[in-house]
Structure formats: C-alpha cells, structure tokens
Image (cartoon, rainbow, N blue to C red):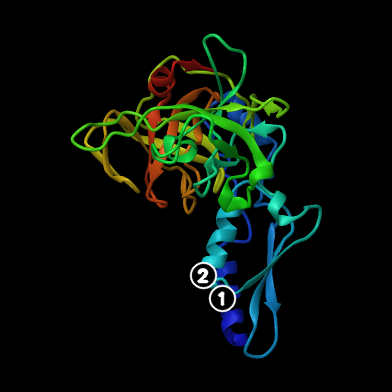
Amino acid sequence: MELESVRSLKQELLARGLTRRTVTREILSPHAAAVASALPATPPPPSIALGVTGKPGEFRLAVRVQQVTPGIQANLDEIQARANGEVALRITGRVVKQQLIQRVRPLQAGFSVGHFRITAGTLGGFVFGDNSADPLILSNNHVLANENQAQAGDAILQPGPFDHGQAADEVATLSDFVQLALPPDRNRVDVAVALVEQGIGTDPTDLQGLGPFAGLRDTPLETDEVVFKVGRTTGLTRGKVTAIEIDDLTIRYDIGDLTFDDQIEIAPADPGQPFSQGGDSGSLIVDADRRAVALLFAGNDVDVTYANPIAVALAALNVHF
C-alpha cells in the first residue's frame, strides 16, 4: 500500500474502536452484577496498537497485540480483511506466540476446536453418557462431524485446523452425532460429541469472564431474556432472546439448504458488538445465572443468531452435564 493509504486505514480502524473492547455494565442477576463490579468503570485500554511498516510502495499496516482479551480474534479478523491482508502482525507484551492464542490445556469451553477436515468452530462444553464418567466434548455436527461426512473415531483437533491445529493437537475422537437431514425432512438440532482422549485434561466449570458453570436450566427460555456465550471468534458476548419456537427456518450448509424447527433467535444486546460470528458455532449459551439454555449453530454475523434448545440437543444424543 501507499503510505497515505495505510495512514488513512489506521485512522479509520481506530475510529471504529477495533483496537479495544468495551465491556457493558448492564446486568440482570446478582452474579452478573458481581462480575461487572470487578470491571473498570471506564473503557479498558487498547489491546491492539496500529502503525506503519515497510518501505515506499510496499507499506503495510503494523498490528501489535498488546494483550489477548475476549473477542480479540474477531477484531483481528476484521482488521486483516479491511487491509486486504496487507498487515504485519506481532504479539507483544506478556503474550506468547500467536498460534498459542487459542491452544488451551486443560481443555475449556469457548475455544477453537474442530474435525480435522473442517476450518474451526467452538468447544461448547463437556457432557457425559449415562454409563461412563469419561468426558465428551459438546459442539455442532458441522464442527465435529463435518456435516455428516465424518466417522466415529475421527480426530478432533484443539485448536481447529484454521487456527493452525495439526495432528499433534488431537485431543478427542468423534463419538456420536445426529445426522443432518436434507429436505423434505426437518431438523431440530445440529449436535455432536467427541470422546476426550486419555491424558488430556478438561476444565468443565470455567466460563471465561462469567464464572463457574451452573449446569442445565430446567425451565424454558422466554423472549427478552438476556443470555451470554463464550465463543472462538467473538469471545464473551451478551445477547437478548428475540423469538422462540421458530419453525421453517432455512439454514445454508455445504450439503444444501436445511430446514429447522423449534429454534431460538438471539439478537446482540450491546451496540456494535455482534452476539456471534463465523467460528462461534458450537458455543454453549447460558442465562444470567450461568445455566445452559441453548447450543449456538447459525447466524448472519451481524444481528441475528440461532440456537438449538439445549435440553433437546442433549436428549438427542442421550448425554448430560
């Protein structure tokens, strides 16, 4: 890029707030209030610095990650897209190498995961079968089972392949999934589980930024309720339920346009912050008391997200938290 183009882009990105993540303080439950009280009253300092690097005719946008924060991957993705890939990314400060941003041991909910032949989705959480104490990773069929194309025993990587996951990052093997049905048949869930391999630790209780997971909610969601999720791309976000029991919902998959019934619709609750984006599929959605209510599987990256009722998803594979 030309020097003035880089300078102009840098100012645009700064003005859009892509170098920092603003955390809202509006909450609905005593626990959420406790979480918010620990947050700074003013916007946090920038976690990304922007500059210029290169030489005449070959200038690039210098992107310097000063601190890894929830949602930073989405900001980095947007910065790179707006710069048409002409960026020089460097991790600085207390952060280690870039490829370790989403590699987590023991395994935790909210981080990158995926079947070895997909890009990447999100590790939603951990569940168990009725007759086994061995933990299973919970996520979507299209994250763990490659839209029906996988077989039991296939390798599951953390992080997912798009996030530089390789054979050495295998943490689980595909255990079971609900087949995605083509029209005229209908779907209620997009769900799969994978058996965590021996020697791979898990942390089933930590919800980054929210606190300890509180298990399954036993009452249905209602419209206007506030919910939360932690995902691979956008990190911790807050949404509002805008509709429930949605039928005849058409979702585009690689294998075709599929129809879903009895789905939950969620809109962003914070201005300028989508509830989910690509890569967040498989995220566990919880209420303000950190109880599981839904499994995220689709969205338009801007103002709408769709999710399966979590009780239906668990029952479909006969698993439980």
Task: Determine whether the residue tagged by mark 1 lies in a helix, strand or loop.
Answer: helix
Q: Say whether disc 2 or disc 1 marks the residue closer to the N-terminus.
A: 1
**Percent of width and height locating residue 14:** 60, 68
**Percent of width and height locating residue 264:** 35, 32
Is 68 left, or right, of 278 in this rendering? Answer: right
Marks 2 and 1: CB-CB under 8 Å? yes
Q: Residue at x 38, y 49 (%)?
A: 303
Viewer-nearest of labels 2 and 1?
Answer: 2
Q: Find residue 9 and name its label.
A: 1
Asked if 291 appears above or below 207 in the picture, the reply is above
Outermost residue, left side: 184
Asked if 261 appears above or below 251 in the picture, the reply is above
- The total number of labels drawn is 2
Q: Find residue 304 and name its label.
A: none
Task: Determine whether the residue tagged by mark 2 lies in a helix, strand or loop.
Answer: helix
Is 67 left, or right, of 171 in this rendering? Answer: right
- Quadrant of res 41: top right
**Residue position marked by numbered label 2 in the rendering:** 82
Label 2 neighbour load within 10 Å: few <14, some 14-19, many 20+? some
Q: Residue at x 69, y 49 (%)?
A: 101
**Percent of width and height locating residue 226:** 45, 33
Question: Residue flagged by tag 1: what amino acid is it?
Answer: Leu
In the rendered image, is residue 232 in sight? yes
Q: Residue at x 58, y 12 (%)?
A: 132
Choose between 132 and 311: the one closer to the eye.
132
